[in-house]
Image (tube, helix red, strand yellow):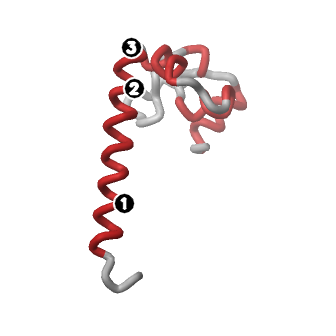
Amino acid sequence: MKPCAKEHFEKKKSCNKCECRSWIKYEEDLNCTDVAIKKNGCMTLKEVAKRLGVSYVRITQIEKTALSKLRKKVFTKDKTNYNNE
């Protein structure tokens, strides 16, 4: 957990740094994704969609794209690693 998120979590004070990569507009989690994960643990895609203010379908599209990119990256890395490093 980032130091700023830890501070917000301990003081139970919402974050107002909109430029932060961890910032979300969700007061229940003090506007911080790090706090949301610390507070709730693993979340369903529907819970993530609710926090981000987008549809469940959009979250599944994002997940599918991200997993596809990760698979390509791993495959490319393995395929070009001729020296077994």
Quadrant of res 11: top right
Q: Quadrant of the C terminus?
A: bottom left
Q: Which residue is mark 1?
A: 74
Judged by depth in the image, the label closer to the viewer, 3 or 2, is 2
Q: Is residue 12 left or right of residue 84?
A: right
Q: Is residue 19 left or right of residue 7?
A: left
Residue 60 numbered tag: 2
The correct choice, above or below, for 66 with respect to 48 in the image is below
- The amino acid type found where label 2 is placed reads Thr
Q: Is residue 48 left or right of residue 74?
A: right
Dot 3: element: loop
Q: Which residue is mark 3?
A: 55
Residue displayed at 30% across by 54% down: 72
The correct choice, above or below, for 67 with respect to 8 in the image is below
- The amino acid type found where label 3 is placed reads Ser
Percent position of residue 54, x then y? 38, 15
Judged by depth in the image, the label closer to the viewer, 3 or 1, is 1
- The amino acid type found where label 1 is placed reads Val
Percent position of residue 50, x then y? 49, 14
Percent position of residue 2, x then y? 57, 44
Q: Earlier in the sequence, mark 3 or mark 1?
A: 3
Quadrant of res 63: top left
Q: Residues within 10 Å of mark 3 (few under 14, many from 20)?
A: few
